[in-house]
Structures are given as structure tokens and as C-alpha cells.
Image: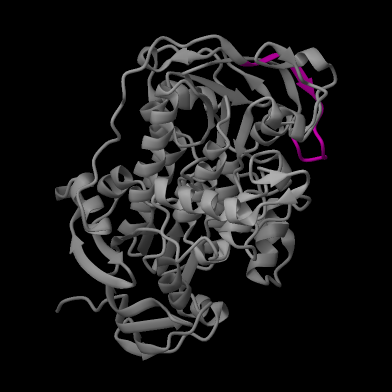
Amino acid sequence: MAALPRLDLRGIAKTYGTTRANAGIDLTVMPGEIHALLGENGAGKSTLVKIIYGVVQPDAGEISWEGRGVAIPDPNAARALGIGMVFQHFSLFETLTVTENIALGLNATEPLPALAARIAATAARYGLAVDPARHVHHLSVGERQRVEILRCLLQQPRLLIMDEPTSVLTPQEVEGLFAMLRRLAAEGCSILYISHKLAEIQALCDRATVLRAGRVTGECEPRTTSPAAMAEMMVGRAVGQPDRPPRPAPGAAVLEARALTLPAADPFGTALNAIDLTLRAGEILGIAGVAGNGQKELLAALTGERLAPVNAMIALAGQPCGRQGTAARRRAGLAAIPEERLGRGAVAELSLTENALLTGTDGPNVRHGLVRFAALRRFAAGVISAFRVVAASPEASAASLSGGNMQKFIIGREVGHEPRVLIAAHPTWGVDVGAALAIHQSLLDLAAAGMAILIVSEDLEELFLLCDRIAVLHAGRLSAPTAVADTTIDAVGLLMGGLHDAIAA
């Protein structure tokens, strides 16, 4: 007798105002299956998994769990059924131990020593090396993810939902995660896996369901379907690789750091230790590293959010600027794309026209301290057109855009100010394959036009696709940059893990 589906969704629908996030979605996940959920930003994936986990209630449709109809009014009900979820953004308390964090997540009543023993046993069983007694602020990002997974595994889930689980892991950590997921599936647990990394989907998943505009557009078996074919199912058109325009040899140095040393700004930050960096005109330099190794501190120092102890530690176009703030560095030709799109890159409640002003108060859209709103609207409309931003108009709010479209607008806004240096932090983080291709092409075109570009990213495939040279930041120290042609993803991954002699292929 054929096994009953672990999870069976029929006709799931959810509308927010005039937006149909889910429109009659059917999805079946079998016991022991690793099932991928694919789709562009705004395709309805997040809404669907929130419905499965009880965070959001559907407007219509039926949910069956192991052959019987169920309602899932909240996450407690989901966990009681056997559904666990590891979110993309961790929810851990830095000052508590691993055991204390897991106890809070489980609402555990057992003594902490007994829980610690259970954590250690579960960690050993699935190869998740974590010390239950360690404080979270001492853990790497990969270790923190293991804590989140352990918290789910201790609930003995029969369905585990994972949202972009490899976005901040080294290649070696990804291999370990996949081994654990395969073992879990072999024991009968179902896994619903969300990722924009199609090569990972192909390597790991048994089946994939593809969403577009809130509807199911197809299913496939990833192992026999190419990443290009899956991308085409997601976006409705062929998606290739970006064109690499011819580029002359890099020009003069336009951004330099010399022995940049900076203490951590908070107890859980990372101190920068003797950072040396040179970025030349027409070059794309990548900085790889696992999150929490000083990227935030380095970006703050280079953009002027934090001042260097000595003015000469940072230079723009040959002029020392380490003691100058962000406004002075912008006037000298530096633009930045922050990691956080909303809150740092844009203000959700403001229109795109108003957001265009945030980093351009010294440009032609402002005269004698007065905003020229007609010129500003034309500037915003030009960004929307040039970068193919899907938005109702320049007066649409930033909050109304998908993550990928908001990222394209922020990049277009910064490029529109015609900087000499562009610093981009995680430029395609959480962005779908179509938007990522557009962003990658824009960065390559800008470098070909002579702009100096510094990319900070944990996505090694992205760095190898775009960059001329790559350096690795680990524990506040920056390795010597190496030409992409002279190294490998595995070698860079070892450097990200702290093996300082690994960058040579």
C-alpha cells in the first residue's frame, strides 16, 4: 500500500489587499522526501511556508497532514503536529548558552543538565558539533545554524522546513549540512527546502515545486533537470549568464586601506587587525568570509560610518580620508550599498522619489538647500527604467517592492550619482535568479566603464563569477588578494574557516 503524503495542500489561497500572494496552490510532500520550493522574490514561497507553520492563516484551501484534514492556527499547533522550521534569520540570545537558548525555544521544563545531555546526544547522532555550554556570542554563523537545527530536531519533527539555510555557510559547512539532511530524510523525516541556489537544489532534492506570481507553474526532478531549465520555469524566460564586457587593465588605486586597525564597537563585534587593501579603477575586488568576522566593521570604516584612528589609514583617490565622515567620502566619489535593504538602504514608508534623495543631497536634485522635486522624480523614474525595477510609479512606497526590485533600485540610485568607487555588501542576498542576473550584469558593465567595485559577500559562486581578485576576512584579518584564476572555491572556503595558507589552488 502506497504511503500517505506527509503534507498535502489543496487550493491554498491568500490575499493581502489587492495582492494575491497564493492563488490555488497544490503541494504534496512525501515521507522521507527532500522537496524544494522554488520561485522568484514575490512568487509566494514565504507566504506558503508561513501558512504551513501556522504563522499566517489561508483565505481558502485545505491542509492534510498524514491523511487527515487539519487546521494550523499557530506555530504551537504546527510543532504539535511535528512541523519544525529553521528560519533564514536566527533568533538566538547572544548572552545565553546553547542549552539556555534551546530551553527557551522548547519551553522546556526539564533541568538544564538533562537538556544539555539530550542536546549533546542529538548533536552527536547527526554530526552537528556544538558544545551545549558555550555562549552564543562565541559561536560562528555555522555553529549558530546548528543550534537552530538542534532546537527543531529535539522536537522530533516529521517535516522540517528550511529557508535559505546555506546563505552564510562555507562550502565545507554546506557539505556537512547536506549530509545531515540526507540522514534525516533516510530516517523518514520530510524536508521542505527553500533556496535560490539551483546547483544546491540539483545536488540535494528529490523533487521541486515551482511557484510564479502565487501559482504553481510546474514540478520537476532536480537531479535530471538543469539549473538553467529550473531558472526558466521560475521566471518564465530563458536565464543565462551575464555578459562580460571587455575591460582594459585596472587603472590607478582609488580606494586604499593601510594597516587599518579598529577596536570592536560592541562586546560582540570583531576588531579589525592591520587590514591592507587596494582597489583600482575598473576592477572588481571581492571580500569573502563567514558573517561575523569583521565585515560589518570593515564596511563601516571604509564608508565613514566609523572613523579610523589615523587619517592616513584610508585613502580615496590618493587623498587620506580615514578621519572624514560619510558625507565627505560621498563628495569624494564613494557610494555604498548596505546589507540591509530596508532601514539602511531605503525607508519603507517613503516613496521611491523620496528614497532617491537619501544619498543625493549634494547633487543636481537639490539647489541651495531646496529639493527640486520635479528633477528628483525624473531621477527616480530614470533609475526605474534603466534597472528595470518593477514598481507602479516613482511615487510607489519602498515597502511595496519585492526584495529584488528594491535592491535594483538602491543600486541604480547609487550608480546614478556617478561615483568613482562602489562598495556593495551582499548585492544579491535573498534575491531571485532573474534579479540576480540583472544586478550581476550591471556590476560588470560598471567595472567595464571604469568604476572601482568592492563586493563583500558570503556567496562564493557570486564572487567567482564577478570578481577579478578575492581576499578573505577571518577574525578581523584580511588575507592577501588572489586572482580568481589562481584559486578555487574550496580553497577560499578553507580560508573562510581559518586555514590561512589555503588560498592557493
Q: Which residues are magenta?
A: 255-269
Q: Specify the quadrant that holds the C terminus.
A: top left
> Residue drawn at (67%, 32%), measured in percent from left and top?
299
Identify whether 86 is placed above or below 81: above
Q: Specify the quadrant that holds the N terminus.
A: bottom left
Q: Is residue 39 visible?
A: yes
Q: Quadrant of residue 484 in the image?
A: top left
> Residue drawn at (35%, 46%), measured in percent from left and top?
197
Identify whether 306 is placed above or below 215: above
Q: Residue 491's x, y, as percent?
A: 43, 20
> Residue drawn at (41%, 64%), measured in percent from left and top?
42
Identify whether 276 is placed above or below 360: above
> Residue drawn at (58%, 29%), measured in percent from left and top?
419
Q: Is residue 22 left or right of residue 411?
A: left
Q: Is residue 117 visible?
A: no
Q: Nearer the viewer, residue 446 or 467?
A: 446
Q: Residue 37's x, y, as percent?
A: 33, 62
Q: Nearer the viewer, residue 17 or 218?
A: 17
